[in-house]
Image (cartoon, grey):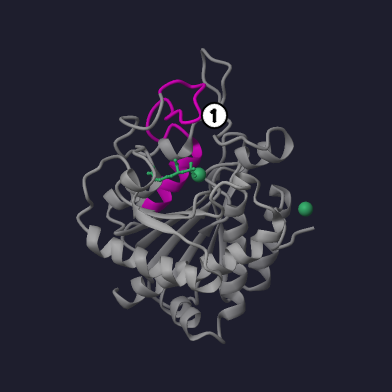
Amino acid sequence: AHSYTKYNTWSEIESWISSIASSNPSLISKQVIGQTYEGRSMHLLKLGKSSGSAKPAVFIDCGIHAREWISPAFCQWYVKEALEKYGSDSEMTNLLNTMDVYVLPVFNVDGYVYSHTTDRMWRKTRSRLSGTSCRGTDPNRNFDAGWCTIGASSNPCSETFCGKTPESEIEAKNVADFIRSNKSTIKAYITVHSYSQLLLFPYSYSYGLAADHSELMSVAKGASSALTSLYGTRYTYGPGASTIYPAAGGSDDWAYDLGVKYSYTFELRDTGYYGFLLPESQIKPTCEETMLAVNYITSYVLKNL
Ligand code: 0X9
Ligand code: ZN
Ligand code: ZN
């Protein structure tokens, strides 16, 4: 059965998506943005009070990398908290009255399933390529942002294989198509990974500073200190290239260059003791502290619309 404090399987998450959307029709709607390589549906939730006109929006995705199980757990937690807090907490109420929040609970569904059934440490998609028996592309090297120029590999057997072409992965194309189609309303892009306790922003494909560097840095600083305030968890923040490593083809850099100014990558707990195998007992504290950082960013965006 589904639980917010467990690592749910894809089938549990898929049932949860249906039931949460049908139980809260005035605050949530769902849509399918496309199918995965293996034919699974990519479900997207839209949270927000419907108003007559188009609302500015935030886009949050989880589970780009299959083995980072805390990430989809966070997206589920976010939806739960948004529903719980709407109407009682003024920050969440204002957010959902003024903006829409799109939540993609699992981006790399095929990889997520494979990490449950066959290989717990799987990272990539599950697509096939002729001429090799190695499967999968790194979806966070497959976006059209300095594609395959640095920190990515053209070897299909590599964990950071950039793919045959930008957006060769149907999952990356589906997300990119959705964001391009809603480019005029999407004001912030937040992508959730693990692990390392970092809050990153563009650029990762270059050491050059983003045009909005100072503002992105100050929002990251505020978000990190909000996160730390709950349990003392320390986060490092800064541009991807200099804070973690240079790596091209990421969704954050791509969204930023498309014009989504507030583009952030979270690397959740921990710093390596458990790594990707973060115990389920840490789901709740990790999600609670991360909520504070995400709420800080969305509140900042709302204030600066
Ligand atoms: O390498 C990645 O894709 C991310 N780290 S992870 O350990 N979750 O794989 C960091 C992504 C930072 N952003 C870009 N490289 N664009
Ligand atoms: Zn279960
Ligand atoms: Zn990742």
Say few, some or many: other residues with alpha carbon within 10 Å of mark 1 (under 14 / 14 to 19 / 20 or more).
many
* Quadrant housing residue 12: bottom right
Label 1, secondary structure: give it: loop
- Above/below status of 133 relative to 116: above
Query: Is 202 on the left-hand or right-hand side of 75?
Result: left
Note whether residue 144 is visible.
yes
- Above/below status of 2 relative to 113: below
Name the amino acid, label 1. Answer: Gly
Q: Nearer the viewer, residue 103 or 234?
A: 234
Residue at the disc numbered 1: 136
In the rendered image, residue 250, in percent from the top left (x then y), is placed at 39, 42
Residue displayed at 49% across by 82% down: 93
Outermost residue to the top: 131
- Above/below status of 92 relative to 192: below
Most common secondary structure along the magenta stretch? loop
Residue displayed at 58% across by 64% down: 287
- Above/below status of 148 relative to 9: above
Query: Is 11 on the left-hand or right-hand side of 171?
Result: right
In the rendered image, residue 251, in percent from the top left (x then y), is placed at 39, 46
Check if residue 232 falls in the magenta segment: no
In the rendered image, residue 2, in percent from the top left (x then y), is placed at 75, 59
Residue displayed at 53% across by 50% down: 271
Note whether residue 297 is visible.
no
* Quadrant housing residue 216: bottom left
Residue displayed at 67% across by 37% down: 120
Span colored in magenta: 154-179
**Quarter of the N terminus within the rendering:** bottom right
Q: Nearer the viewer, residue 76 or 175?
A: 76
In the rendered image, residue 160, in percent from the top left (x then y), is placed at 46, 31
